[in-house]
Amino acid sequence: MELIFGGAYQGKLDYVKDNYEYSRICDCSDGREPDFDADVIYGIEGFVMECAKAGREAKDFFKDRETLLGDKLLVMTDTSQGVVPIDKNVRAFREMNGRLMLYLAEKAEHVTRVFCGIGKRLK
């Protein structure tokens, strides 16, 4: 499994399209549950937002499906930068997203950060 992350609008999906072979992308940016039959799971932060709203821990969802991660490319937005939101629900989402990123980075064979469309392998 490989984790690819970066800030919003930094070219993560274009980076994947230009540098990896895949047959199907699951886009979770609208909050849908990840489809582990896809090669690329994109927009994971959208799913995390829905989990935060429902009071369900996103990290536990992925932990319970760890065997399905295999050779997947997981693409998500790093929401940890910038001003801490006043709204407690947005803070809860950002914290949950961070916990999931920590878990996935630990489990991943490779971790790549994309900034301005340029990928830098961190692990």
Image (cartoon, rainbow, N blue to C red):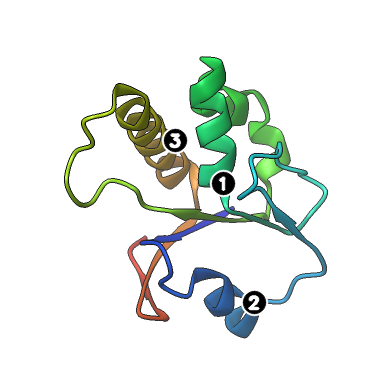
Query: Which label sits in the foreground, 3 or 1?
Result: 1
Question: Which amino acid type is marked by label 3?
Answer: Leu
Relative to the observer, which residue lies in front, 112 or 95? 95
Kindly identify the residue that appears in the image at 56 percent across and 43 percent down: 46
Q: Mark 2 falls on what kind of element?
A: loop
Which residue is identified by label 2?
Answer: 20
Q: Quadrant of the C terminus?
A: bottom left
Which residue is identified by label 1?
Answer: 44
Q: Are marks 1 and 2 in contact (CB under 8 Å)?
A: no
Q: Residue furthest bottom?
A: 18
Query: Which label sits in the foreground, 1 or 2?
Result: 1
Q: Specify which label sits upstream in the sequence, 3 or 1.
A: 1
Relative to the observer, which residue lies in front, 106 or 56? 56
Q: Report, in whole angstroms, how far the alpha carbon at label 3 lies from the one at label 2.
A: 23 Å
Q: Are marks 3 and 1 in contact (CB under 8 Å)?
A: yes
Q: Report, in whole angstroms, how far the alpha carbon at label 3 lies from the one at label 1.
A: 10 Å
Q: Is residue 26 above or below residue 96?
A: below
Percent across and percent down for residue 85 are 23, 36
Question: Which amino acid type is marked by label 2?
Answer: Tyr
Q: Residue furthest left?
A: 83
Relative to the observer, which residue lies in front, 116 or 121? 116
